[in-house]
Image (spheres, rainbow, N blue to C red):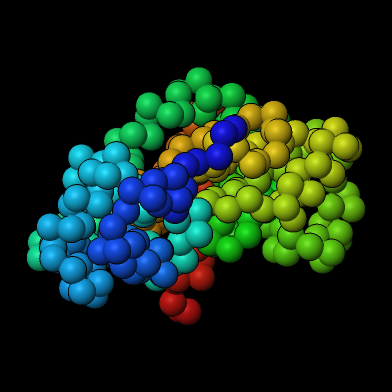
């Protein structure tokens, strides 16, 4: 893949064409790219000590139609480096006095509406089939993915499947991987960043003949698996929740209930009976 051309590259290519005022603007924007990518034209101009119109002229010199377009390119150039605080700021910058809750709901709805176009019903059926035939299911994920792993495993167990979380994708995973064998399945959850420890768990699973299922929002930098369910969790560079992969996991649970000839439903009924036993007051 070719390297992305950044704003700094564009500036370097046209350095001789820039005025002193242009260079002062560039220095402000690139001194802290994450912060600079959110500065409106009048604020960056004020900090640089130049007229606001200079920002628009600079953008056009660099090949952009407007300053807003140039600022968007700067934001895109730092997406891979954005920490949580910057991603939250980017989301907040789009609210602009509107309802924050409404903005969050709209973002989640957009992400969910895009889900069906990225993962087909056939993909879900194939993935559920892999889980349905598994002797044992191990679910592994780092960071926020580990929270979803806990929830997914709990629902698998309540549906009658032998499932467990690989709580630590490091040397402590050895105990859980000892009994992994052909006929078992490892489910890898990888979101936003590459995850070398999870890659190692998947590689080991493949080496012993176990099946592998990947649930991710990444299109590259992920391990090869028997089945991959890939769906973006929202707009690039913004704060992302687990709504989309949670919907994928819930759909897999429902597909198991529909296709495993009553296994899930019988176990769920038993779970309800046991819960009523603990809720019942002593006579």
Determine the image quadrant of residue 29. Answer: bottom left
* Residue 7 visible in image: no
* Residue 211 visible in image: yes
Q: Is residue 207 left or right of residue 140?
A: right
Query: In the rendered view of the protein, which quadrant contains the N terminus?
Result: top right
Report the residue at 43% width, 41% height from top.
232
Q: Residue furthest left?
A: 97
Q: Residue furthest top?
A: 122
Q: Is residue 120 above or below residue 160?
A: above
Q: Residue furthest bottom?
A: 282
Relative image position of residue 209 (x, y in whole percent): 85, 33
Determine the image quadrant of residue 54. Answer: bottom left
Relative image position of residue 166 (x, y in whole percent): 72, 58
Relative image position of residue 52 (x, y in whole percent): 13, 63
Q: Is residue 245 left or right of residue 260?
A: left
Q: Is residue 96 left or right of residue 234?
A: left
In-front residue for pair 154/243: 243
In-front residue for pair 193/209: 193
Q: Is residue 224 left or right of residue 183?
A: left
In-front residue for pair 111/30: 30
Report the residue at 31% width, 44% height from top.
62
Relative image position of residue 149 (x, y in whole percent): 59, 55
Report the residue at 19% width, 45% height from top.
66
Q: How many marks?
A: 0
Report the residue at 39% width, 46% height from top.
14
Query: In the rendered view of the protein, which quadrant contains the C terminus?
Result: bottom left
Q: Is residue 74 above or below residue 222?
A: below
């Amino acid at each position: 893949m070719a390297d992305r051309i950044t704003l700094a590259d564009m500036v370097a290519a046209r350095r001789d064409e820039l005025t002193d005022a242009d260079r002062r603007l560039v220095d402000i924007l690139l001194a802290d790219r994450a912060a600079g990518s959110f500065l409106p034209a009048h604020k960056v101009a004020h900090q640089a000590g130049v007229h606001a119109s200079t920002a628009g002229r600079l953008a056009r010199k660099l090949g952009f139609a407007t300053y807003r377009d140039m600022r968007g390119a700067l934001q895109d150039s730092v997406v891979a480096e954005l920490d949580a605080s910057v991603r939250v700021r980017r989301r907040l910058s789009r609210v602009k006095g509107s309802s924050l809750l409404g903005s969050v709901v709209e973002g989640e709805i957009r992400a969910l509406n895009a889900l069906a176009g990225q993962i087909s019903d056939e993909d879900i059926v194939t993935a559920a089939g892999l889980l349905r035939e598994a002797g044992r299911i191990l679910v592994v994920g780092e960071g926020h993915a580990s929270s979803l792993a806990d929830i997914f495993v709990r629902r698998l167990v309540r549906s009658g499947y032998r499932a467990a979380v690989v709580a630590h994708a490091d040397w402590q995973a050895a105990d859980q991987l000892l009994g992994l064998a052909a006929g078992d399945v490892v489910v890898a959850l990888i979101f936003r960043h590459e995850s070398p420890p999870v890659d190692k768990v998947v590689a080991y699973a493949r080496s012993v003949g176990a099946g592998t299922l990947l649930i991710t929002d990444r299109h590259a930098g992920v391990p090869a698996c028997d089945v991959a369910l890939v769906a973006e969790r929202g707009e690039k560079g913004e704060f992302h929740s687990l709504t989309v992969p949670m919907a994928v996991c819930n759909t897999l649970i429902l597909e198991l209930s529909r296709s495993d000839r009553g296994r899930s439903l019988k176990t769920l009924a038993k779970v309800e009976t046991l819960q009523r036993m603990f809720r019942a007051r002593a006579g």
